[in-house]
Image (tube, grey):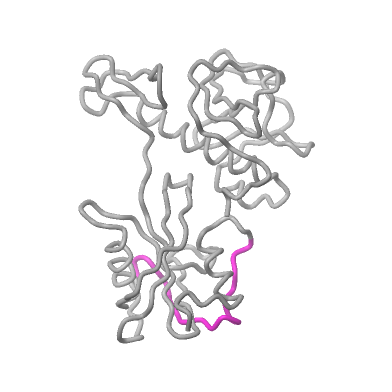
Amino acid sequence: MIQDIFPHSLHNHYNPKALPDDRSRIFYFRGNRIFLETGRPSILPFFKELPSEKFTYLFSLDGMSCFLAESKRKIFPEGEWLTLRNLRDRKNLPKEEIFAAWTAGHIQRWMMENRFCGSCGHETVPSPTERARICPHCGRTIYPRLNPAIIAAVVREDKLLLTHYANRPGAHFALVAGYTEIGETIEETVRREVMEETGLAVKNLKYYKSQPWATAADILSGFWCELDGSLDIRVDEIELDHAFWAKREDIILQSDDFSLTNEMMTIFKEGYKPFGK
């Protein structure tokens, strides 16, 4: 998955007193696009190459401090501006740097969306002690947002339920997915989403793994579950254009190893039996 970058490591401990040095990595954003250098194996610029007037500590990558840069700079070295989603299509880029860029983008978007207090409208400021925004007027503290969501791999004997999103002609095949709603447990989300999208009931939920998914500010929880009752699929045509039962050998995998969805599809295709049958 995208966060599986060993032997590299990303440490998200917040250090508001950290200052950049020549080896620090810099993240420049313009809207939803990030600047990446080209013509060398490493894609993230160093501070010595692109010093900035204002910066915010993000995290460390392989022991090197990483900062979000704010600058009126108009001239950049050779490079390009890509959305975080575009990065997934660049197979030659270092995986650890893509994960770092996604994580930086998550933080940058949260900072931009919370420049002003949602309670009183006053401009917020960074917390001096933790990764948070504080309203100096009403005292509200705003932490980075995480949206809980699920991935549901529904199994029927030796087949897996696959879906395809509506209005996304180039999208990969996927598993049932959706956000947890207010007043709902994660397990209830699994049952509701499977029923809403495919008309199927499930039982024997078995937790698998979790994954941060920065482009949607998600924390995903993956579950295996068994079909409970009728196998007749009734597709929610707003969410999906089709859903079907796929034999292991017929499962078409995604083109990279970034997603929790693809990992679950992969191990099932390779013979994994989540319920020992």
Residue 250: % across, % down: 58, 81
Number of marks:
0
Q: Is residue 95 above or below residue 121?
A: below
Query: Which of 74 and 124 lies nearest the eye of the viewer?
Result: 124
Residue drawn at point x = 30 percent, y = 63 percent: 187
Q: Is residue 82 above or below residue 120?
A: below
Expressed as whole percent of the image width and height from the top left, the position of residue 206 reads 40, 68
Q: What's the residue at 30%, 62% (across, down)? A: 189
| Residue 2 within the magenta-colored segment of the rendering | no
Q: Quadrant of the N terminus?
A: bottom right
Image quadrant where residue 25 sits: top right
Q: Residue furthest front?
A: 276
Start-end of magenta stretch = 237-255
Q: Residue at x 79, y 36 (%)?
A: 40
Above or below — where is 91 with respect to 112?
A: below
Q: What is the x, y in percent for residue 52?
A: 60, 16
